[in-house]
């Protein structure tokens, strides 16, 4: 079996243990969607592609382990895995890495997914990160404050959706940011400039317009 097909195990709410054969190469969209009793997800080295929403709403998974062969993670591959406390990535993986339990691109420049099951109230994005990925902090309900270093120059849409407790987003370099109302405008650097120097304003503004604006620094 090389492919686990679309929705093959979705909504298997009684599935508590998952062993993916090392013959599997592709995990299709929503293959394990809403397997709400899984407490651990281990993706073997044989897997190269995990499609969009493949493990979305696996709400009990505390640890997600990613094997050496995974080269492509689809958007929202682990969407709203509410309990996840750590991502563990094989050191041999050429595309991704983990840092303090959070998921990054291998070069460390893109924060792809914060482990939203953590109960920390504060998080400082490491210096050197340049981009915050789509839905990166989605439903991180315990966070009160997030600090972004000077190296961050882009914040994707939907990043802080559902972060209801978040009161401060601190931009180390708050000037020169613009908000774009679509991904195309964001890419083309066509948007409205906004001042993000007030951390409480930045939090309320970004949370309020999470569904509409993408942010980039020029």
Image (cartoon, rainbow, N blue to C red):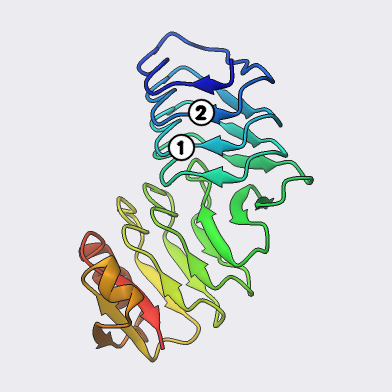
Whether residue 51 sits left or right of residue 24 in the image: it is left
Residue 200 showing in the rendered view: no
Q: Position of residue 34 (x, y in %)?
A: 37, 23
Q: CA distance from mark 2 to mark 1?
A: 6 Å
Asked if marks 2 and 1 touch (Cβ < 8 Å), the reply is yes
Residue in view at x 59 percent, y 50 percent: 103
User: The N terminus is located in which quarter?
Assistant: top right
Residue in view at x 32 percent, y 69 percent: 203
Q: Position of residue 138 (x, y in %)?
A: 38, 50
Q: Is residue 153 above or below residue 173?
A: above
CA neighbours of label 2 inside 10 A, class few (<14), some (14 to 19), many (20+): many
Q: Position of residue 12 (x, y in %)?
A: 39, 12
CA neighbours of label 1 inside 10 A, class few (<14), some (14 to 19), many (20+): many
User: The C terminus is located in which quarter?
Assistant: bottom left
| The residue positioned farthest toward the top in the image shown | 14
Quadrant of the rendered image containing residue 56:
top left
Q: Position of residue 46 (x, y in %)?
A: 69, 29
Q: Which residue is mark 1?
A: 51
Residue 101 showing in the rendered view: yes
Quadrant of the rendered image containing residue 13:
top left
Q: Which residue is mark 2?
A: 27
């Amino acid at each position: 079996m090389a492919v686990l097909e679309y929705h093959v195990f979705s909504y298997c709410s009684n599935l508590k243990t998952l062993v993916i054969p090392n013959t599997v190469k592709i995990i299709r969209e929503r293959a394990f969607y809403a397997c709400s009793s899984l407490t651990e997800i281990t993706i073997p080295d044989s897997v190269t592609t995990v499609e969009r929403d493949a493990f979305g709403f696996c709400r009990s998974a505390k640890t997600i382990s990613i094997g050496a062969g995974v080269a492509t993670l689809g958007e929202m591959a682990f969407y709203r895995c509410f309990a996840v406390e750590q991502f563990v990535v094989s050191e041999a993986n050429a595309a991704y890495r983990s840092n303090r339990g959070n998921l990054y691109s291998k070069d460390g420049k893109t924060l792809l997914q914060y482990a939203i099951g953590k109960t920390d109230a504060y998080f400082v994005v490491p210096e050197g990160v340049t981009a915050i990925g789509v839905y990166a902090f989605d439903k991180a309900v315990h966070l009160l404050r997030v600090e972004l270093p000077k190296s961050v120059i882009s914040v994707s849409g939907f990043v802080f959706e559902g972060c209801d407790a978040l009161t401060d987003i601190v931009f180390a370099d708050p000037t020169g940011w613009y908000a774009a109302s679509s991904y195309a405008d964001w890419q083309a650097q066509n948007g409205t400039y906004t001042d993000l120097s007030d951390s409480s304003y930045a939090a309320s503004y970004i949370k309020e317009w999470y569904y509409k604006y993408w942010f980039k620094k020029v």
